[in-house]
Amino acid sequence: MTRHVRRRPPGRGSPPGRRSFPRAAEIETTMVRLVRLRTVMLFVALAAAMAGLGARLVSLQVVQADGLRALADRQQLGTVPLEPRRGRLLDRSGQPLAVNVEAQSVYAVPSKISDPARFARLVAPIVKLPPGDVRARLRPDRHFEWLARKVSSDIVERLRALGLGEQLGFIQEARRVYPNGGLAAHVIGFAGIDNQGLTGAELGFDGSLRGSAGLARIERDALGRPRFDTRAIVREPVQGADVVLTIDQVIQYIAERELDRALAETSAAWGTILVMDPRSGEMLAIATAPRFDPNAYRDAKAQQLNNPVLSTIQEPGSTFKIILASAALQSGAVRPRDVFIGTGQLKVPGGYIIKEAQGRNYPRQTLGEIIRRSSNVGAAMVAGRVGTPRFHETIRRFGFGEPTGIDLPGEAPGLVPALEEWRGSRLYTAAFGQGISVTPLQILRAAAAIANDGVLTRPHVMRAVRDSEGRALVVTAPEAVRQVIAPEVARAVLAMMEDAVERGTGTQARIDGYRVAGKTGTAQKPSPYGGYLSNSYVVSFVGIVPSDRPQLAILVLLDGPRGVHYGGTTAAPIFKAVATQVLWHLRVPPAAAYSLSR
């Protein structure tokens, strides 16, 4: 029996034969290629990663460098504005009217407050805020929140005594103070908590007073909270300039004292006394009452903050007759010796009958006598001869119906109807100041123009602007607006006003040793339902002293004095009291001494 022997394949269980060597070499070659491929791929990946990293580095360090640097600064550094010191307001002699004092402001650090309800309960009564208001400000993500600005030292001490540590912070700021209280309050105005002017000269000259803010850089901690002890000044603040006003503190005090006395005696609703240099337009005093204290302006009523000298328009009454006289002489429609025949009343177009006050009758009058007696019928007859176009033109040339241009905010233009609206009796009633509305300043300015040889000037309250070293930056020069009437006409009207004081309705304005020119006014107040109120008046007196060398133009006006009051019996004596004291203060010699000195 034949045995079959099974052969084993080469390489299995026996030493490799000749056929195994090519196969091994092939495998080895494949492995080498695979390793090389992987190495290449690794190097390519590494190269790509390095290229990407390099590109990112270039982007961060070159392309985005400025932005990222700014972002880092915002995270680590912060900037705070540095409030400049506000310039002072001074009177014409350099006496302070508005200054700055150091004060502390209080802020909370909400992120440090663990018990906001307790914090609000402790702090709110001291800073005079409702606890709910304080609590609402304490957002935990905030690191700074104002609680009170520019408070008294007493409040600061009470807050420190609470022992709240880092929950409270204090910053020193400048606070605006008015050392004379309510003196000239409506002229000065007041500045807000951030030292921005809000009314009066504080607002009108805010650009000069405010200065330029500086800038400081501060560090922040890891939580982003500002560290004020790291403050470094980047840009110094520039102090505001001082503004010197034309107001004379002494004259202002005299005017306010006499005005307060008059209001107490007459129970008038309000009043004003204005004092101007008629040659330059400088306002020496602007007194109004009631007034407010700019140190506590928040306690004043809204209507008290408006300056009635600029914003209140009223019918002027008989003081407007000097404008009529100017129109009559300037136009040539009336000559000084012309006589007007009257019967005590005059019927004018529209069925309106004009009568003399208190039933008087002046049968024969010249223009000068009409002014002296303040005759309404005579004024209406003069107006009829002048005519509407010429009278209207003169009114506008005196500046009525437009702002005077005084360098204080809030001035009203008054109300002068357009020429085409002068129908019916308007021409005749305007002759004695009815049917048009003016501001007190406009009446004073017109009288000053008559005293200034017919030249209308712009009233102003800024005398100069000075830097912190006292050097003048701006000086206000007198500004002539226009020649309203001829000098000889102005002198003729001024003489009529002198006669009104010497022998007419203004005798109680006479001052021994001085020539005084003036005109009284007693205007009925219009009724809101039409017509005029029977027992409500605005009484006034406008005067020039000394009239032979004018240095003062003064207006006294009282709105709604109770009882029987007239411009000649109520306002004229106040004019005398003010003018007498101001003449003494300015060392203006009487006429005799003046004549001897020439």
Image (cartoon, rainbow, N blue to C red):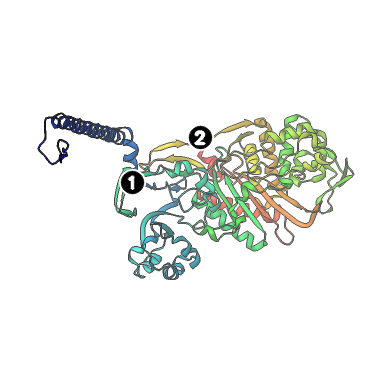
Q: Position of residue 23 (x, y in %)?
A: 17, 31
- For the residues labelled 2 and 1, the Cα–Cα distance comes to 40 Å
Which mark is first along the chain, 1 or 2?
1
**Residue 586 in view in this figure:** no
Tell me where residue 420 sits by quadrant.
top right
48 displayed left or right of 95:
left
Amino acid type for the residue under numbered disc 2: Ala
The answer to the question of whether label 2 and label 1 lie on touching residues, with beta carbons closer than 8 A, is no
Q: Residue at x 66, y 38 (%)?
A: 402
Mark 1 element type: strand
**Residue 498 in view in this figure:** yes
Amino acid type for the residue under numbered disc 1: Ala
Q: Residue at x 44, y 69 (%)?
A: 117
On residue 477, the disc is 2
On residue 216, the disc is 1
Mark 2 element type: loop
209 displayed left or right of 75:
right
524 displayed left or right of 541:
right
- Check disc 1: other Cα within 10 Å, few if <14, some if 14-19, many if 20+: some
On residue 378, the disc is none
